[in-house]
């Protein structure tokens, strides 16, 4: 019998074992052993990314790896949690070149350093279809401090971090439907910025990240909290590049998704605390509307106070 490693295990040893973090058993076993920090609650989240659906097939593999990590970190950020490590599955066609795995793992390694996480384990397999990736991020939060979708209150303000719409416009640029010589918008689509470290526990009464579109994700909070919400379109923060796209792209900004900014419900008495926490982290925050009693729904109003009719609510994975 040959002493050579089977192709799958050779791939793991070359590209993924260098990513292994504490508890991974150096990826030499079928499971990881993880001890959470004392007195903390575990937070677990998982997201899948499929070529042609969540990223373009010709996107650089290092940026694909970094985006996969970051969209999951964004879910932790929305809970007010800190990351511990992650599990990952990678399914690729048999003819995927080795250079793709080299770039993909290099991107992961870069962001592992930036965000202080390590690979705990997972699985690799071949597929006849497009590249399919899944990552389960594990984090921790102080007991009772996790932020949920439910919990928004009548009178709370609606707040977002960063700017809205860049990701969706970046996809439009990458697919030839919009021009942006600066490259900023494509960069925002390919490499979102998770707001890990922003201490929203005890400040936000509810929240989530904006992955499927501002209006649609706000609707999730409305339904979970049993409230209505109003967004003032003129208050939604847009980057200079998004404004340059023109008003005809406003609906895309409000519904397109891929922002991975935080969407928060904040009581008026805690707005100062949010601003102070955001300033300490170097993160911009903007109040864009408010929650009020009523049937769960989202209304977007223009500068004239009239409701804007949106052709679609947001991104759908199906």
Image (cartoon, rainbow, N blue to C red):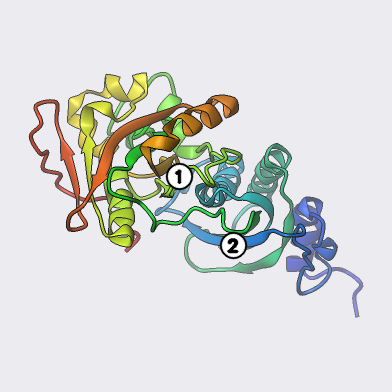
> The N terminus is located in which quarter?
bottom right
* Element under disc 1: loop
Task: Classify residue 2 by image quadrant.
Answer: bottom right
Q: Residue at x 64, y 47 (%)?
A: 104
Q: Which residue is mark 2?
A: 44
Label of residue 37 in the image: none
| Left or right relative to 316: residue 305 | left
Q: Where, by quadrant of the figure, is residue 126 drawn?
A: bottom right
Q: Of residues 7 and 20, which is closer to you in this image?
A: 20
Q: Dot 1 corresponds to which residue?
A: 204
Count the labels in the image.
2
Residue 235 pos. (x, y %): 27, 27
User: Which image quadrant: the C terminus?
Assistant: bottom left
Residue 46 visible in the snapshot: yes
- The residue sitting at 59% across, 41% down in the picture is 196
User: Of tags 1 and 2, which is closer to the observer?
Assistant: 1
Q: Within 10 Å of the Cα at label 1, are there few (<14), some (14-19), or many (20+) other Cα atoms?
A: many
Q: Residue at x 32, y 57 (%)?
A: 220
Give residue 193's position: percent from left, percent from top: 53, 36
Look at the numbered disc 2 and give the secondary structure of its residue: strand
Q: Is 50 displayed left or right of 11 in the figure? A: left
Q: CA distance from mark 1 to mark 2?
A: 20 Å
Badge 2 local density, few (<14 within 10 Å), some, or many (20+)? some
Residue 48 pos. (x, y %): 50, 60
Q: Report the front residue among 208 and 54.
A: 208
Q: Quadrant of residue 194?
A: top right
Mark 1–mark 2 CB contact (< 8 Å): no
Q: Nearer the viewer, residue 161 or 30?
A: 161
| Chain-order first, disc 1 or disc 2 | 2
Q: Is residue 201 above or below residue 23?
A: above
């Amino acid at each position: 019998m040959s002493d050579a490693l089977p192709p799958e295990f050779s791939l793991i040893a070359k590209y993924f074992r260098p990513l292994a973090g504490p508890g991974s058993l150096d990826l030499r076993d079928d499971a990881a052993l993880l001890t959470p920090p004392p007195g903390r609650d575990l937070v677990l989240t998982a997201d899948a990314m499929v070529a042609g659906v969540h990223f373009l097939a010709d996107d650089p593999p290092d940026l694909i790896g970094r985006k996969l990590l970051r969209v999951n970190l964004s879910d932790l950020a929305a809970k007010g949690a800190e990351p511990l490590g992650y599990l990952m599955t990678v399914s690729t066609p048999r003819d995927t070149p080795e250079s793709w795995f080299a770039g993909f793992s290099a991107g992961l390694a870069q962001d592992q350093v930036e965000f202080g996480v390590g690979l705990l384990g997972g699985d690799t397999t071949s597929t006849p279809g497009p590249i399919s990736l899944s990552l389960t991020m594990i984090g921790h939060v102080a007991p009772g401090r996790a932020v949920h979708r439910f919990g928004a209150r009548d009178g709370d303000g609606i707040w977002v971090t960063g700017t809205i719409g860049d990701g969706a416009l970046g996809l439009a640029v990458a697919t030839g439907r919009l021009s942006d010589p600066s490259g900023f918008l494509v960069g925002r689509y390919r490499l979102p910025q998770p707001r890990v470290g922003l201490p929203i526990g005890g400040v936000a009464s509810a929240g989530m990240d904006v992955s499927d579109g501002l209006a649609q994700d706000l609707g999730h909070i409305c339904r979970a909290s049993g409230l209505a919400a109003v967004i003032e379109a003129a208050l939604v923060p847009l980057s200079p590049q998004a404004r340059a796209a023109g008003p005809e792209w406003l609906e895309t900004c409000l519904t397109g998704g891929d922002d991975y900014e935080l969407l928060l419900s904040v009581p008026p008495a805690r707005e100062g605390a949010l601003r102070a926490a955001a300033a300490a982290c170097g993160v911009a925050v903007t109040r864009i509307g408010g929650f009020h009693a009523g049937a769960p729904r989202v209304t977007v109003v223009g500068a004239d106070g009239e409701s804007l009719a949106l052709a679609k609510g947001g991104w759908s994975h199906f």
